[in-house]
Amino acid sequence: MNMELSRRQFIKSASVGIAGTTLGALGFGDIEEAYASSIRPWKLANLTETRNTCTYCSVACGIIMYSKGDLRKGEKADLIYVEGDPDHPTNRGTLCPKGAGLHDMVHAKTRTLYPQIRKPGSDKFERVSWDAALDRIARLIKDDRDKNFIAKNADGVTVNRWITTGFLAASATTNETAWCTYKVVRAMGMLAFDNQARV
Amino acid sequence: MTNSWTDIKNTDLVVIMGGNAAEAHPCGFKWVTEAKANRGAKLIVVDPRFTRSAAVADYYAPIRQGTDIAFLLGVINYCMNNDKVQWEYVKAFTNAPYVVKEGFTYEDGLFTGYDPVRRDYNRSSWDYELGEDGYVKSDIDHPRSVWSLLKKHVALYTPEMVERICGTPKDKFLKVAQMISECSTPTKTMTSMYALGWTQHSKGSQNIRAMAMLQLILGNIGVRGGGMNALRGHSNIQGLTDIGLMSNLIPGYLTLPTEKETTFDVYMSTRGFKPLRPDQMSYWQNYKKFFVSFQKAMFGAAATSENNFAYDYLPKLDVPAYDVLRIFELMHEGKVNGYFCQGFNPLLSFPNRKKITSALSKLKFLVVMDPLQTETARFWQNHGDFNDVNSASIQTEVIELPTTCFAEDEGSLTNSGRWLQWHWPGATPPGEAQQDAWIMGQIFQRVKALYQKEGGAYADPILNLDWRYKDPTEPTAVELAKELNGYVVEDVRDPNDPTKLVLEKGKQVVSFAALRDDGTTACGCWIYSGCYNEAGNNMARRDTSDPDDTGIYPKWSWSWPVNRRILYNRASADINGNSWDDTRKLLWWDGAKWTGYDVPDIAPTAKPDVVGPYIMNPEGTARLFVRGMMRDGPFPVHYEPFEAPVANVIAPKIRGNPVARVFLADMEQFGDAKDFPYAATSYRVTEHFHFWTKHSQVNASLQPQFFVEIGEELAKEKNIEPGSWVRVWSKRGSVKAKAVVTKRIQPLICDGKKVHIVGIPLHWGFMGETKKGFGPNSLTPYVGDANIETPEFKAFLVDIEPSTEPVA
């Protein structure tokens, strides 16, 4: 008997009634349980558990992320598996078809990895360093702000606004990131400020 | 949400209208299943499509998209005519008895004061009549009482009229109205679960108001199993709204000054919120405490009483708001140079994609921060039919910055039910991806350094922004959360006993009740005050206890405001403070104070027969008549979408919402039913989340390809085979899709005319793991809600024909 029998193959076999006959007779009736119990200690012993929240809709299901490596010990952590948090009052361990795919989103081939710049008229991105990208952005901000900042309106009223550059914020970032973003954007005098709540 | 996901189990009737919780919010929807299984609750679904929510409903009624107000005012009319009103609640807790000013009228779809040139109202007559004592006159039998006016206003919306406008067969409408009206008894509650199916209309705000009014008439606000429950779309869209990352907001729903508010005193003079009825709390009277504490959190020592707490540091608005429609219009006019997209994909998310592409092409620079490679960051890249642009002609400099995603960062997210839940990172960011707070810190430090070195335009707010983080280039989540909670800037002593320290410098404030208007406290967002106080990080709490299984979970995470789980919860008890329903007690008066399962939404010792439950309103009551606070009317009115298959039956000359802002060129881009005969709508499918999950292999495999959904009759009429290619176009653009021919969409008869509906899901683009595709926003009109400018994505006109496969 092939001991590599997968869970899927097993279920398929069971569904045509073999489990109760041939496999059962051969002592494979407990194979599913044995399979599960062979995974569980491995999952708990070798992976780090982290509590998180599903990134999609605002039901905000609790999730448990299992990673190889522990960030808290300064290790590199690779996300292996995500499941619903059974302790969470709202989702009680369940996830929907979106949440069940979280692992693949984290490991998407189309994650952004490096700062890139596309020059005017170009048909491609070019990789740049963080320093180069951030310095460039700071320069673009300052030049536009200095040139177009409106200190007083036509009536001479102090208005201190800058409307030639805008900022669209993200509603999957944390409240803390939102506050940090708010501080920077408003301190510069930007008014063209919005987020997904609008759409 | 006024209530929480877990509270839905307490309801007797769920109405899903303007949403599709079973598919878009599946794990929240199971609380509907819980209520059905354990309480015998019923589920009503009203939707143009027979959705998966409808599939498990006890009763389904079809409706044409964009006609919800006619339906809901029809239900209100039914309740009023059949005496299905929670009278005690309506008389004590709403403004139904208040008398409205003489001169207020409504005729042919318009209220008093309309100016067709400005597309705006003079709203001065939309208000109460005040007595000599300065308080609102109250007499429910008065011909100009809110109740009398409402009765007159909704009389038009008979079951026959509802059928004519909405296409909902009269018998189906009556069945829904009858089921809803049963919840007018104090011991039966209904919950409203809605989402973007209500907001994404040129009268979206009034859709929601109409249901809120119905819920008040039934006495269903502030009670367990009741409420107005907005099922918000993104994991922290509630948080970003609360913290006010919008053109005209300051955190906690304070508002940015306009240029007419030339001084701090003028600004404060319109925010006094003097009570309109005797003895009311009118909680916004504390506005100055929240505003000054916010300014202290922003500008620290630079905000002093001498400089009006740095009032001049804040930019002043010259228009109501620079919302996204306005800013992309300005961009399109060539008046915007730079734009930042932090985790947002406007090329696919905003209406009229052709205009968006053209607008982005006029920018000098675009910065995109995102964990995923978005279409927006590549708007200049040619992808054949899917993004047909000439790269060489686009002069925009584009900078793409890689960010972390949820698995790699720490902090709190606010869910629909206002729970702030803390999460921890469990994965190393890929490549060189960085956290958004790091990026913002880096940008800020570099800009600040440039100003220090070179000087430049009004640098004071930049140089004085309070930025005392341990590592200024990387504020931590804990440091930022503590600022949101608020802290004591200077010792505060008891004025009667100076030896007694009331507030100690450097400590976290316990809640917003401790905030002060003299600069001695700082607080980033007053409604979040209490989230991270001296007791620690309350958002990280994980105690699952729930006394008496109320569904409150008072010690799980932390809920704003002050850990309150159900807003307006004082209204769960009658005028004497006794619970309306002893099986669903929430808060009650014990003779000396309020007590119960939740944190009272009222002063703990406020007498029940004196202080009203709607403490944020100067009236102390909830508003059936909203005075001049909404641009398009104190009551909702049925207006057709700007692109409608039929004329407005009640006011044939009015196109769309008469006060919705429309830019000139966009007005010319509205199509008419003679050229575009089919009523289109957009929506999500359960396997996908916006434009993110198309990057996830498993989700891309589940729903790999863009499609549109049409009914069998239309397919036959147009010779469209199931699974074949079709072209769908509006006056603004054209898409190609696979046709799904379905029984889920049926034609409706509206004003005698057969209306076919075309469903267009929104998840495809030209990046990610799915097949390349389009979305509805190549077609959608460029117009927003009259009050808050949410685009009208849910109702527009298209034509359709058999076609061929697009070329990549």
Image (tube, rainbow, N blue to C red):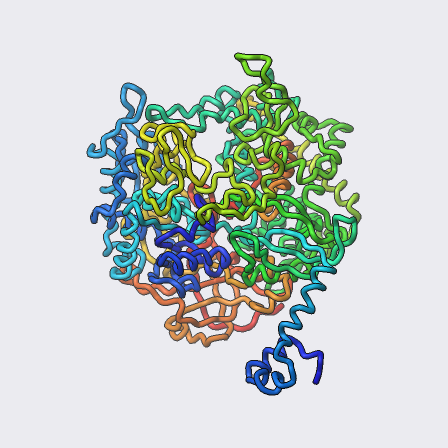
Name the image quarter holding residue B339: top right
In the image, is A53 to the left or to the right of B593? right
**Residue at the spot 38% in from the left edge and 47% down from the top edge:** B226
Regarding residue B675, the answer to whether it shows in the image is: no
Can you say which quadrant of the picture contains the N terminus of chain B?
top left
**Residue at the spot 70% in from the left edge and 85% down from the top edge:** A1
Regarding residue B806, the answer to whether it shows in the image is: yes
In the rendered image, residue B283, in percent from the top left (x then y), is placed at 44, 28
**Residue at the spot 61% in from the left edge and 43% down from the top edge:** B540
**Residue at the spot 67% in from the left edge and 29% down from the top edge:** B465
Q: Nearer the viewer, residue B59 or A85?
A: A85
Can you say which quadrant of the picture contains the C terminus of chain B?
bottom right
In the image, is B520 to the left or to the right of B551? right
In the image, is B677 to the left or to the right of B740? left
Name the image quarter holding residue A67: bottom right
Q: Nearer the viewer, residue A86 or B471?
A: A86
In the rendered image, residue B513, in percent from the top left (x then y), is placed at 51, 27
The vertical placement of A2 against B520, above or below, is below
In the rendered image, residue B349, in percent from the top left (x then y), is placed at 55, 53
In the rendered image, residue B703, in percent from the top left (x then y), is placed at 56, 67
Q: Nearer the viewer, residue B512 or B64?
A: B512
